[in-house]
Image (cartoon, rainbow, N blue to C red):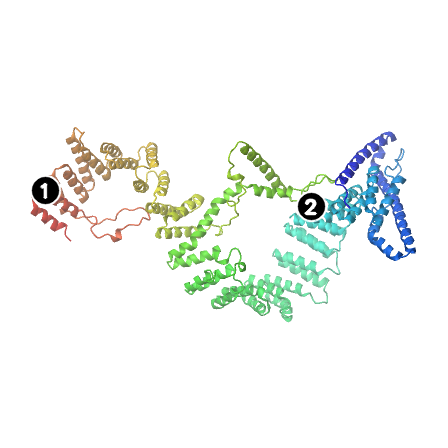
Amino acid sequence: MESKGSEIDEFEKALESALDGSTEEEEEDENEEGEYSDDDEEEEDDDDEEEEEENALDSMEQNQQFEYEALAEKKRKTLADAKGEGSAKKARQEDMTGASLAEIEEIMNFGMRKKRRRRMPKRRGRRKGSKNKLSPEITRMLGDATLHYAHGNYEEALTVLSEVVKRAPLVADSYHTLGLVHKALGNTEKAMKFYRIAAFLRPKDSSLWKLLFSWHVEQGDIARAWKCLSKAISADPDDISLRSLHALFYDELGDHQRAAESYEQIVRICPEDVEAIKTAAKMHLNCGQIKRCVGILEDYLKGHPSEADLSVIILLADVFMEIDAHNNALQHIERAQMIYYSGKELPLELMIKAGICHVFLGNIEKAEIHFSALQQENFSIHPEFITKVADAFMSTECFHSALKYYHMLEVNVGADNEGEIHVKIAQCYLSLNDRAKAIMFFYKALPMLKDSIDARVALASLILEDAKEDEAISLLSPPKDLDSLDSNSYMQNPWWLNGKIKLKLCHIYKAKGMLEDFVNTISPLVRESLYVKTLRPKVKKRLTISVLRERISILNVQENDDVFGEVRPLASKSDLLRACRARKLLQKKEEQKAADKAAGIDLPSDYSDDESLLENRVSPLHDFLKDEAHHELIIDLCKALQSLQRYSEALEIINLTLRLVSDKLPGDREEQLQSLLAQISFNATDPKHGFDYVRSAIQKQPHSIAAWNCYYKITSRLGKSHSKHAKFLRYMRNKHKRCVPPIVISAHQFTMLSHHQDAAREYLEAYKLMPECPLINLCAGTALINLTLGFRLQNKHQCLAQGLAFLYNNLQLTENSQEALYNIARAYHHVGLVSLAASYYEKVLAACEKDYPIPKLLNENSEMENMKPGYCDLRREAAYNLHLIYKNSGAFDLARQVLKNHCTF
């Protein structure tokens, strides 16, 4: 049968109004009964407790009376039916449809507890009468309801109990019986609500709080379960199981401090609870409170001078050994042997721990005496003890002793642990410089530890020492039958994709000169690590809506309008604080989202739940860009990419590296990267990357000729349409008035555009700043001579003389070099003074110039190796021009003779 949906709401409203009315009546009665003296105020709490106990006793007596009547009536009816035909069968049916014995005992025992009587001092004034005594009619109705429940007439029981609640809403017995009826009907949720009301009215009944706690745990309502558990502990403070659950809740929340305090309360109630003592000590150990942890265990041992639990002694020794206090651990073990095991053999575990302490203290002979007991045992019985002994010897670098025990394990351990034993044996042999045996045991371990990264890397290093690069590459490469392997047999991150494996493999490829394989192996890892480094600062500041909702989920306590009222979420303080901040941020985002939607604005990506950009990605290279080896790796990778003409990838890596850690790189590494950037930019198809680099370099060193040479080489490839170049050049000229290179570059650009007058003006301005520069004299002279050939110039002869003056000045500054002579001859030839040109061409033919290295940028590849000797000699060019002059003047024989002497091979 199902009751109406509003039944419980009506009961709760009636209960609330009754509680309000009861409060008002008590206040009126207190006003009517008169005043107490000042001495009586100290006794008010004790009087309230006495009144509560008297009321509970009256209710218990009344409850017991109608329960006995209900049971007697049921028994009379059962006997009367048994007299007729088929009475036995009918009686069995009544028992099946009625209440069980356990349920009847639950009704009779409900609310009963031992009453501790005490004599209270008398107080002046009229004694207050009990306000909670039940009327005979209510008592009779409760008895009828109990009788109906016992007979299985649940409808009638519900009807009677509803009337009882309306008349006397503060009687806990009615709600408890309602809970039993609904539980029998299968309405568990309604039953628990009535139990909750009954527990509220009878807070000292721990059985109800336990029942509610179990039900809330099953429903997943941890917050209310916690509150019920706290109420149950208040009702029955001596219940150890309740306090254990309380401590377990704190432990799951990560509050080890409070968990330890809860276990200490259990120990105070039950000092012989060894598990509580050990758990409290472990909780303090998790909090880093070593002194308190040791104190709890030592207090237990002091309180048991004749007999103590072995596990406590072992735990205390473990704590001291964990903090490397082996001397203290050994003292406690020896004390335990004298007190608890005098004349007896020390337990094997304590004996092994004592031996391990001797190992760490350097007493190897004493340790072996303790370990002799282990050798007498069957090896397969205590493999964990043998492992601890072997590890202790290995930690203290006693490798021969460690090998003895590891070899004992090698024979007896199962397949699950055999690979790890083989690795440790290999490490011992490696420490003893026995490389052959170390390689053998590493190979034995690999079939059982396929995913062991360290074992593979160590084995590969040993193989490389024997110059077996191909074998090492095969060991570190993915399996050849990768497609046929079962994907479920490997982890999501297989061993061949690990960063350590890739690093080792790329170093082998680099040593062998396999640039293509080197780049293909390490380039994805470097780019992914740089991407993670770039993305991580954004991830810290940006949270999606789904992440915010996940954080708020701990605040979503089930909202039930019950006697508990508001229930605080069960979580740590840090989680609650973070959830509250997330709720405020989510509310702000939702409001902004609604406002943007109302205004017809497209929602930005921040409102999306797509978390692809915020994926928790981990850098494949550990401590990337913090290690010096990683800096060298990036430089080697960029050089390899340059050799393979993969310029865009190299530029991306260099730019990201300089942007992320330019302030942390050593000076030589940063200079190498910048030089590589410049060199790759010159060779790349798009020189814009190089422009950005040389621009920043010039801003740092505005008077560096090398930097301006890089800049001019880049800008000459950009063409005329690059707007940043002209703006930057004007900026540098205005900022550095006496800086010559930007003036010369501007003049060169005017020359390229055939604006010779503007070019001459710029060259003359540069000449004022650097009059002794041969290049400026040469450029100024050529600009003036080119200007002479224009149609608009009136004083051409003066301009020509000025131009030749600058060329002769260049000749003087270069100490009559072949190049300066050729430039003068070329100028005369250009303006038509062929006789003077012929004389200077002959001077060029008479001079001999040695080869000079061609200037180049840092790390720039030059083609000098492919150039033939004499590349600085201008005699061939001078002979060719001279033969043109002879030819035009009709001296063909002289022309042929000049070509024959200087231009034939």
Q: What element carries label 1?
A: helix
Q: Is residue 85 rendered to the left or right of residue 436?
A: right
Extreme residue toward the front, this view: 85
Label 1 with label 2: CB-CB less than 8 Å:
no
Residue 114's spot in the image, x, y percent?
Answer: 85, 48
Residue 192 horizontal/vertical position (percent)? 75, 45
Specify the quadrant of the image occupied by residue 574: top right
Any mark on residue 1, and which? none
Q: What element carries label 2?
A: loop
Place of residue 27 in the rendered image (x, y in percent of width and height, measured from the top left): 83, 31
Query: Viewer-nearest of labels 1 and 2?
Result: 2
Residue bearing the label numbered 2: 221
The CA distance from mark 1 to mark 2 is: 110 Å
Instruction: Name the spot of residue 339 as percent of width and height, x first.
Output: 72, 62
Q: Could you say which disc has been placed on residue 888 in the image? A: 1
Specify the amino acid type for callout 2.
Answer: Asp
Depicted 639 relative to depicted 748: above or below? below
